[in-house]
Each structure stands twice: as structure tokens, then as C-alpha cells.
């Protein structure tokens, strides 16, 4: 099958498991070199080892900057650009969620969600933009969520952060278009990562009933959207938030 990202260099945050790992694998299978970010050295190394065991010819490396510290993010991005000559694709996928009620919400926890889900997206985008600009262009893709479209009834930081991701996506798309940098987001619905896989079967069945396509999404369903948006097939698509949710929008 044709490799859509041959010769491209990608930097993927939250690439050690779940949706991020599926994106990393999809990009590797399509000929890209990938630098994946984990939150710890061990988790980054484990993901790289597993990928190399699966296919020894994958060009993949792990890094583990603190994504909530601008200097560390900039250092990891500059390291990648220097080692591989450029960065064509940035995926801001790392994210956390919490379902606390506003009556018991610790303000420090709100700040933590915003720091990783919003500030880190800005940090990596700021660090990568001059590299992409000097290379003639690039693609930034952010992981949003279906809750960025209509909110959710608890854990207000999470939907708030994903509304912010959509705003940053649309604004940076306009700002960076003149430098040939496309900026898009993918808004997954309920996706079968560790968190969802561990739910009781009755709860999973209840979730399925809310999804018109009748099943919970897989990480690969979501990764396919990241492949499309990173590829030249999406060369005229920017500022878009693409829902991948089985039509679960209300
Ligand atoms: P996951 O918990 O399996 O993976 C989260 C990733 O983010 C991990 O690789 C983790 O290392 C990284 N991460 C979290 N906190 C970090 C930190 N402080 N520093 C560095 N890395 C950190 O979750 P997932 O379901 O694969 O989620 C990935 C993205 O998809 C998130 O942005 C999430 O909000 C979004 N999303 C998930 C779903 C879903 O149903 N699973 C739905 C919509 C959106």
C-alpha cells in the first residue's frame, strides 16, 4: 500500500499508549520517522521497545520532556529538528481528564488539566512554528474531544480545555497559513483506550446505545483521521475540527 508520509518527521506527544500510540504506529507504517513523547523515561522507552519488537525497521525514538515546562518542550523539539533535519508534523495529543463536581473541584486540579491540555499545546506549537516556517511549511494536529462541541455535566476543566484547543486550532490556522503551516484538530468520541476498556460491560453497552454507528471507536479509527490530516491529501484543509465519534454528536 502507498505510504502517505514517506520522508516526513513527526513529533507526537502522549505517544506511549491509547490514541497517541495508534497515531505513532499509523505514521510509522506510512513511512514517517517519529519522535514520541512520554511522561516518564520508562514509559517512553517501553513504547519504543514494543514498536521495534513489532517492526525492527521502524524509525522511532522516545523523549520525555515535562510538557508543562516551556524550556523542556522547546529543548525536545529543537533536539528532534537538529537530529532529523526538520519537523513536518506536530501532534499535540497528551491529555488528562477528571470528572470532579464543581462543588468539590480543587482549583489546583483545574490548573493541572489546563496546563497539560492547553498550555502544553501552545508550548509545542510555539517551539515548532519557526522550524516549520524555515522548512517551507508543516502540519500541526491537536487532539480535541467530542465534549468540545457541547460540554459535559461534570469535570468542567476537561471540556473547557478542549474548547480552548479548538480555539487555538482555528486561531493558529489563520495566523500560520501564510507560512504554509496547516493547523487542525481531531475530536474523538468515546474511544477504546485503557480507561474505557476497563468499564463494566453493562456500562459499555449503555455507551454504545448513544452512538448512532452502534460501536465504541477504536484508537485506529482516530489515528486514521490523524493520518489524513497529516498527509498531502489534506493539503487544502486547515482550521478544521474533525469529529471521529460514530455520529454521537447531540
Ligand atoms: P491515555 O490516558 O491512554 O493517554 C494519554 C497520553 O497522554 C499518555 O501517553 C500519557 O503519557 C500522556 N500524558 C498525560 N499526562 C501527561 C503529562 N503530564 N505529561 C506528559 N504526557 C502526559 O488517553 P487517551 O484516551 O489515549 O487520550 C489521548 C487524547 O485523546 C487526550 O488528549 C484525550 O483528552 C483525548 N480523547 C480521548 C477520548 C477517549 O475516549 N479515550 C475521547 C476524546 C478525546
Image (cartoon, rainbow, N blue to C red):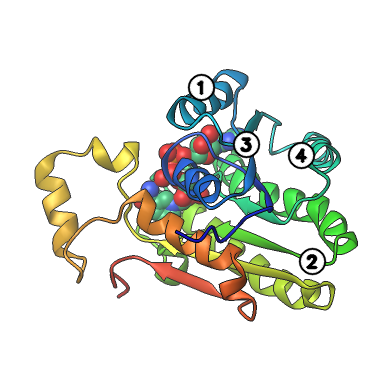
Left or right: 96, with 36 as reference point: left
Which residue sits at x=50%, y=47%? 29
**Cα separation between marks 1 and 3:** 15 Å
Whichever of callouts 2 and 3 sits on the residue coming sooner in the sequence is 3
Q: Secondary structure at mark 2?
A: loop
**Cα separation between marks 4 and 2:** 20 Å
The verdict on label 3 being within 8 Å of ligand 1 is: no
Residue on which disc 4 sits: 73
The circle on residue 137 is 2
Q: Secondary structure at mark 1?
A: helix
Disc number lying in front (1 or 4) = 1
Q: Is residue 84 visible?
A: yes
Q: Considering depth in this image, is 58 or 86 the residue closer to the camera?
A: 58
Classed neighbour count for the residue bearing mark 3: other residues with Cα under 10 Å, few (<14), some (14–19), many (≥20)? some
Which residue sits at x=76%, y=51%? 87
Whichever of callouts 1 and 2 sits on the residue coming sooner in the sequence is 1
Q: Considering depth in this image, is 224 or 208 the residue closer to the camera?
A: 224
Residue 147 placement: quadrant? bottom left
**Cα separation between marks 2 and 3:** 22 Å
The percent coordinates of residue 63 (x first, y second) are: 68, 30
Which residue sits at x=76%, y=49%? 123
Residue on which disc 1 sits: 46
Check whether the beta carbons of the residues at disc 2 and disc 3 lie within 8 A of each other.
no
Residue on which disc 3 sits: 59
Residue most toward the top?
42
Disc number lying in front (4 or 2) = 2
Residue 183 drawn above or below residue 158 = below
The percent coordinates of residue 64 (x first, y second) are: 67, 29
Q: Considering depth in this image, is 20 or 84 the residue closer to the camera?
A: 84
The percent coordinates of residue 152 (x first, y second) are: 37, 61
Whichever of callouts 1 and 4 sits on the residue coming sooner in the sequence is 1
Which residue sits at x=61%, y=52%? 91
Amino acid at each position: 500500500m502507498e505510504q502517505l508520509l514517506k520522508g516526513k518527521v513527526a513529533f507526537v506527544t502522549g505517544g506511549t499508549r491509547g490514541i497517541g500510540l495508534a497515531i505513532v504506529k499509523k505514521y510509522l507504517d506510512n513511512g514517517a520517522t517519529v519522535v514520541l513523547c512520554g511522561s516518564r523515561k520508562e514509559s517512553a522507552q517501553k513504547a519504543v521497545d514494543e514498536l521495534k519488537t513489532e517492526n525492527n525497521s521502524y524509525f522511532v525514538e522516545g523523549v520525555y520532556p515535562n510538557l508543562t515546562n516551556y524550556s523542556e518542550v522547546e529543548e525536545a523539539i529543537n533536539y528532534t529538528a537538529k537530529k532529523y533535519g526538520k519537523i513536518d508534523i506536530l501532534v499535540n495529543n497528551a491529555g488528562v481528564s477528571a470528572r470532579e463536581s464543581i462543588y468539590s473541584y480543587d482549583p489546583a486540579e483545574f490548573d493541572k488539566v489546563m496546563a497539560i491540555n492547553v498550555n502544553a499545546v501552545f508550548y509545542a506549537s510555539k517551539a515548532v512554528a519557526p522550524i516549520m516556517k524555515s522548512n517551507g511549511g508543516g502540519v500541526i494536529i491537536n487532539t480535541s474531544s467530542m465534549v468540545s462541541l457541547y460540554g459535559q455535566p461534570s469535570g468542567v476543566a476537561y471540556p473547557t480545555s478542549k474548547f480552548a484547543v479548538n480555539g487555538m486550532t482555528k486561531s493558529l490556522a489563520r495566523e500560520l497559513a501564510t507560512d504554509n503551516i496547516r493547523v487542525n484538530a481531531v475530536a474523538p468520541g468515546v474511544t477504546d483506550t485503557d480507561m474505557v476498556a476497563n468499564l463494566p460491560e453493562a456500562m459499555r453497552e449503555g455507551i454504545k446505545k448513544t452512538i448512532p454507528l452502534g460501536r465504541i471507536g477504536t484508537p485506529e479509527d482516530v489515528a486514521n483521521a490523524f493520518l489524513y490530516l497529516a498527509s498531502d491529501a489534506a493539503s487544502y484543509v486547515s482550521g478544521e475540527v474533525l469529529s471521529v465519534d460514530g455520529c454521537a454528536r447531540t
